[in-house]
Image: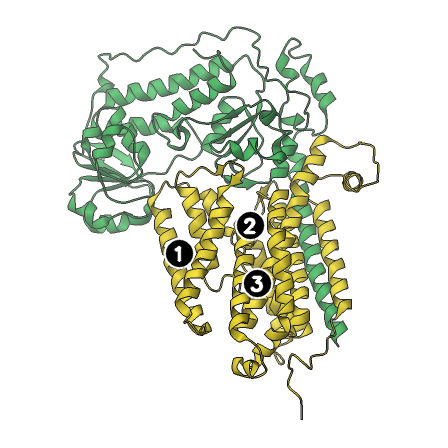
Chain colours: A yellow, B green
Amino acid sequence: MTTPVTPKNQKSLLPWRRIVVWIFVSLACCVLAASIGSVSIHPMETIMITLSKFPFINVDKTWEDSSYTILWEIRFPRILLALLVGASLSVAGATYQGLFRNPLADPYFIGVASGASLGATLVFLTNVPTIIGNFNVLPIAAFIGGTGAVAIAYKISSTSSNTKLATLILAGIAIGSFTTAVTSILMIRTEPDLRPLLSWIMGGFIRAKWADSMFLLPYLIPSFLLVCIYSRILNTIQLDEEYAESLGVNTERTKKVLIIVSTILTAAAVSFSGLIGFVGLVAPHVVRILWGGDYRSLIPTAALVGGSFLVLSDLMARTVVSPGELPVGIITALFGAPFFIFLLIKNRSNIY
Amino acid sequence: MKSSKLCISVFIFFASFTTLLACSEVLQQKPEPAQPALPANVVNYIQKEPLKPEDPMAAAPSEIQFNSPKIETKKITKIKTPVEKKYTDNTPTSNESLKATFPVYITDIDGREIIFDSPPERIIAFDSAAVETLFAIGEGHRIIGTHDYVSYPPEANSITKVGDAFNMDVEAVVGLNPDLVYLFYPSFKEQLENAGLKVLLIPTIGDDISEMADHFRMWGRITGGVMESNNLADDFEGRILNIEAALEPYTEGPSVFQDVGGLWTPGNDTLVGNVFKLLKLQNIAHDIEGYQQISPEVIVERNPQYIISSYSDTFSDDPKYSGVVAVKNGSIYIPSADYLSISGPRFLMGVDELANFIYPGIFK
């Protein structure tokens, strides 16, 4: 007789080797992304500029100012932001998939995306100043829109004693459709130059600055740790909510914490990068197909896989039609989908 | 088993991306030969000097010298006074050809001839440029319907609105009983024709500024305001000639980058791209097709001397662009209105405004 996986008897063995390998893969992706761009910079220059940023290393300035700006103010912030956004979306996606026990769940499942677009649309299409004091209004509006939409859905689905997840999904979808409709009305009724707005909605890192990553990190790190702490409970919830409860898991608190954490994480990521699809849905599945669904290892691996994938996608977005750019969401779907389908075909006998 | 899966996946991951990167490298390198001799700052001086030794523009960056951050000042000095090539005003003459003659035949987008036996009295003009043109030639009273975004001239605000940029309220159009519906996109053409209305859909202006004058003349022929429309068109063409004449002594002007929001920018094959050509400006997005988002890396590298943008804080507040000459010099031009986005009579006001910003004092 097999013993069910319970919080008590799960072997506390993390696949450290796999995680370390993926840390190196992510680093390799970043290096690759740093060395290629629409402007070609000599590899030696790239190395020297990078080295000059390390403490205690003195490098004579031999590079052009423009190369320095391109690397330090454009490429590096972009790569870091792509990495963090990919990780955030993948962690949020994995959490929603686990919590809702629904393979279709992605970070935008319960209305974050449409709420955030409404916030962003309001900023783009009304005459709100884009910068108030030292704050950029756009990410703040997107963040408030995204978290607001989920908060309403959550309020609708909660009674005093518990939260019905099925109701939450339906409420999220209803609120999502409603905010999307409002966004569309705003788009049709205002001045026809929608390009800036549309490129935000399609997602991308063209605006990336160091400050964006610095803003995202304080959301990502605690959220990531919290989800990791809850990953054993996520494993248990996979079986049955009632069963988990009988094992002493406080499912209500778990739901609350995980929904809040993933929503905030997604909203923070979306605020800076716009709506980048597919990463949050697929990165957790890829990890699940290749290495199994144990959330203790799935969460960190999915973060690294999603981050690397988005770094490479952004690299393609800015080089394929150089000197122009494509929205990164197009690349993630265009190249991610065939890869995912390949995995599905390879493994169709033993998943889901 | 597990490790083999890992190997396979990592391999596929990298194989696919390296292939794609290889492709992108090819794409990247392709356009380079098309650009004239890239690195040659020195060569450029040598080539130019014998031609115009005293021409300070020879030292100013040309298309070829995108990464020369040395030039910090805007310097457009003229070498000789512009040729007085003033166009003559088309004062009403007793010319018979300026009289309205009907019937008028206008060829539409499908090559069909639309026949006008008399000037239409109830026009629905679903296009900002057409509305402006009709008012400019004194025939605005014929317009009975237009779309939501038409805001010029002020009289246009009181005209009934029958749709926005995406949707036309066909019922309302039919209800207004027009004798001509002018469209600039084909979506509702068939529906309107089935309702028995006369529809005129002519090709939109591609990238040729002078086509605008033809549009003015066309409206004159249709409405009978031939003389006024000819004056408008002649004036339009004359002003273009004046600009060309005033700029004739100059070789290549400064480099520019136009941002229409979110780093979307017009390439050379656009109306705005041709305005840049007319003003001898070097569009840094010369290798962009139509309108596209441009990579911020490219903006930094090509280092424009002027930036045209309604969103100037995108550039002035961002450390990325702090080294760009236009930002350092504060040469960011904020258009006062979207003249350049409507291909009507006010288009040249946008051109003049831009020209006066970049070449102050050259145009009277």
Residue pointed to by mark 3: A92
**Three-letter code, disc 3:** Ala
Residue B362: x and y in percent read 48, 12
Name the mark nearer the viewer: 3 or 1.
3
Residue depicted at x 32% and y 49%: B187
Q: Do marks 3 and 2 share a subunit?
A: yes
Residue contact between numbered discs 3 and 1, judged by CB atoms under 8 Å: no
Closer to the camera, B119 or B101?
A: B119
Query: Label 2 neighbourhood size at 10 Å, few (<14), some (14-19), many (20+)?
Result: many
- Mark 1 highlights which residue? A180
Q: Mark 2 lies on which chain?
A: A
- Left or right of B25 in this view: A90: left
Q: Which label's residue is closer to the chain start, 3 or 1? A: 3
State whether residue A317 is above or below residue B107: below
Q: What element carries label 1?
A: helix
Q: Which amino acid does label 2 sit on?
A: Ser
Q: Is residue A158 above or below residue A3?
A: above
Q: Alpha carbon of mark 1 to alpha carbon of mark 2: how far?
A: 18 Å
Residue A14 place in picture, x, y as percent: 73, 71
Marked residue chain, label 3? A
Q: Mark 2 points at which residue?
A: A273
- Which quarter of the rendering shows the C terminus of chain B? top left
Specify which label sits upstream in the sequence, 1 or 2: 1
Residue at the image point whose x is 67% and y is 50% from the top: B23
User: Alpha carbon of mark 3 to alpha carbon of mark 2: how far?
Assistant: 15 Å
**Pointers 1 and 2 in contact (C-beta within 8 Å):** no
Secondary element at tag 3: helix
Which amino acid, by three-letter code, is at mark 1? Thr
**Between discs 3 and 2, the one toward the N terminus:** 3
